[in-house]
Amino acid sequence: MMRQANRWLVIGGWLSLIAALLHVACIFGGGDWYRFFGAGEELARADEAGSWMPAIITAGIAVILSVWAAYAFSGAGLLRRLPLMRTALTIISAIYLLRGLVIIPIIIEPVMRTSFNIWSSVIVLGYGFAYAIGTWQFWQQQSANKRAAA
């Protein structure tokens, strides 16, 4: 009997993949895209000045997000099992949740309170919840599989 895919990890994987593609789009979109997505004026100006630094940094982030998507899809059962699955999913969940929790100081400190900071924190917190719930379900499934095999 084939197990059903872990819905929360599928959602998390697609969210990470979309984020990776948006980062790639920023590379091609240039300074205005960097500004719109909150990368900062310094990165936008560097891109407009012809520096490769923004593209390299952004491509690196896109690669990391793509790897995170692969781990989510693997944990969901859509790809072959990747190494250190439990550890990776736990760390990815924690990073997304911690980044999302930046909403707390943003709410407290008016200087940090911009629409971009608020929305990006809320969105990333959603990513974190999808990964955390999916990771918890993955761990539960793995434990059940070990008990059944024993």
Image: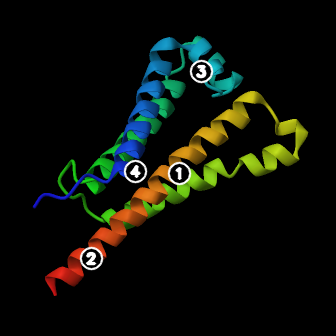
> What's the distance in space between the residues labelled 2 and 1, CA to CA?
24 Å
* First reached walking from the N terminus: tag 3 or tag 4: 4
Reply above or below: 8 against 87: above
Element assignment for label 2: helix
Q: In the image, what residue occupies the spot 42% across and 65% down?
A: 136
Q: In the rendered view, does 24 fall on the left or right side of 120? A: left
What element does badge 1 sit on?
Answer: helix
Q: Does residue 84 lie above or below 100 as drawn? A: below
Q: Amino acid at mark 1?
A: Gly
Query: Helix or strand or loop: what does disc 4 sit on?
Result: helix
Q: SS of the residue at dot 3?
A: helix
- The residue at which mark 4 appears reads as 8
Mark 4 or mark 1: name the one nearer the start of the chain: 4
The numbered dot on residue 128 is 1
Up-down relation of residue 77 to residue 34 (above or below): below
The residue drawn where x is 68% and y is 52% is 101
At horizontal 62% and vertical 49% (from top left) the residue drawn is 99
Q: Residues within 10 Å of mark 1 (few under 14, many from 20)?
A: many
Residue position for label 3: 34
* Image position, residue 81 (x, y; %): 21, 58
18 or 140, nearer to the observer: 140
Gap in Å between the C-alphas at discs 2 and 3? 45 Å
Residue count near mark 3 (Cα–Cα under 10 Å), binned few <14, some 14–19, many ≥20: many
The amino acid at mark 4 is Trp
**2 and 1 marks in contact (CB < 8 Å):** no
Q: Nearer the viewer, mark 4 or mark 1?
A: 4
Q: What residue is disc 2 on?
A: 144
Residue at the spot x=87%, y=48% of the render? Answer: 108
66 or 40, nearer to the observer: 66
Residue type marked 2: Ala
The three-letter amino acid code for the residue at tag 3 is Tyr
Q: Quadrant of the C terminus?
A: bottom left
